[in-house]
Image: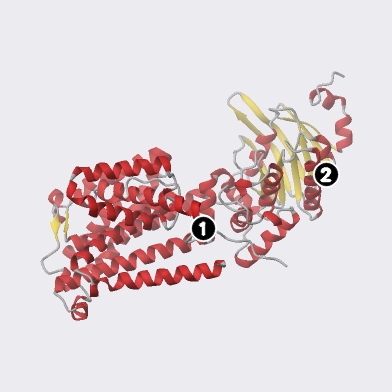
Amino acid sequence: MTPSMKSSATKIVALIALIGLALVPVIGSRAMVQDLFMVLTMLVLALNWNMLAGFAGLVSVGQQAFVGIGAYGMFAAVILWGLDPLIGIVVGGIVAMALSIPVAFFAFRLNGAYFAIGTWVASETVRLLVAQWKALGGGTGTSLPKGTTKDMFGVDVIKDLIDGSSSAAADALTYWLALALAAATLLAGYMFLRSRMGLGLQAIRDNAEAAKSVGVDPTRLKALVFVLCAFGTGICGALLFIQITRVTPDAAFSVVDWTAFVIFITVIGGIGTLPGPIVGVIVFYALQRTLADYGTVYLIVLGLIGISVMLFARKGLWGMFSARTGIDLLSLRHPAPRRP
Amino acid sequence: MSLLKLDNVSKSFGMLKVTDSVSFEVAKGEALGIIGPNGAGKSTLFNLITGNIAPDEGAVYLDGVDMTRKPAMSRVQAGVGRSFQIPQPFTHLSVFENLLVAANFGGGHHGHAADDFCMDILDQTGLAGVADATSGSLSLLQRKRLELARAMATSPKVILLDEIAGGLTEGECVSLIQTIKSIHASGTSIIWIEHVLHALTSVVERLMVLNFGKMLMIGDPAEVMDSPQVKEIYLGIEV
């Protein structure tokens, strides 16, 4: 197969997958919609974290700060300002992006493991501050007003479309938003990495000193990625908590739910590759389903798999597959132009 | 007007003065060689020109513009290209992509113009055949060529070569000199630190000798090499 044939084959497969996923609320059960909603949102978080850690070398353990502040931004928009939750999602993204600027200001003074700890500390600080926010329930949190999600823009239309209850329609709406967000994040990530900025980022990852010597400004590029990923993560956080409908500081700023699992997904799938998080989230979901009834054993198995992959397949399952077969989906390479 | 000018540049690391009131100029299109024993401050001098190190005193001018306080990245964009003593390719990128990064960020070339520009340099430096190879897989000579080509892709007015001929076999060295000569012929100024003296003197028009951070001498290569002082200090011959 020629590269252009391979690329169109990839596009067709991606389109079929997208259409198939889009049809789930129409033909699938509600439980399936809710399950896949979680899968898609975890994928969005993993794509963002992969961009940070896998491409920009920013191993953040504080991404829950942006999930949490995105969620609280959305709650504030709905409860305090009476806005539609869908507008609240945008508010959540913007608030997260705004938060990322002071976080970057402090965390970018640190490198490697210190950066990881620094971002975690920043996230804990934000959690403690948010817990003081009495209007949104302080430490015990708050719920979306009854009926909020059923009154969301578009729910009525979807209700007729899928011929179900208002809450099923609300689930379908958030599901489609999650699907759109996942597709947009993947596409935006791909386009960014293919651009000159993405090339600069890969150069920095290989050798920061040499990158500087050819005019790349590492701090500026990394800061840009950090802020953009905060936006994506914040939007995803807001969307997650529309579905959950209840927010507490502990749940919204959970390092286990929004960062540890996300790291697991990215690492087993293949850090620093675009298809990696997709593979990772499928494995993660399969494990969750098969081991759900075993309680703590589930977490132990998850940990063991994570460690094994890190030891024996450092580039993750996708990296291993790609190296064995030579198949490189969503390739970031720039082939040299052919000359006569 | 000179292209690059250093005016009384000094730099100390603690008590050690590694660059001691160095002043010199490089004209447009000129090739200047720098020699001196290990620890003479040759690489530090390069770092002062590229902006990786800030001088304690003195000033660096490019095209008459004071660059002394400008960061390394903007000096690259202004026209100071460099190659490293130990080749530092972007190992996961292809040879072509290595140049593409430099052309985009340092050279200000974009889109198809950048592609063409990079291919021209690959042709000139003899790397066109390995354009799509991962740079981590190259031989030493190819890596040295890549250092040169990547620096060229930043569209430099002056290119700093740091011991680029070191470690090469005689044959490889000869072929690399041809490439450097062709770059020089195209009008790019060169400042070249080198221990392989015959390589250096076959290209440069002037030669500078550094010792203990001081500029000992600068002038015609043959005259400099003949000077008793240089023979004593640099070649270790008692005169």
Callout 1 crowding tier (Cα within 10 Å): few <14, some 14–19, many ≥20? some
Give B158 or A233, whichever is nearer the viewer.
A233
Label 2: which secondary element: loop
| Residue pointed to by mark 2 | B203
What amino acid is labelled 1 in the image?
A: Met
Give A313 or A210, whichever is nearer the viewer.
A313
User: Residue at position x 28%, y 59% from top?
Assistant: A39
Q: Does residue B134 lie above or below B116 as drawn?
A: above
Percent of width and height locating residue A54: 43, 50
Q: Report the colour scheme.
A: secondary structure
Label 1: which secondary element: helix
On what subunit does the disc labeled 1 rest?
A
Q: Looking at the rendered structure, which numbered label has been put on residue A197? A: 1
Occupied quadrant, residue B173? top right
Q: Looking at the rendered structure, which numbered label has been put on residue A151? A: none
- The answer to whether dots 1 and 2 both sit on one chain is no
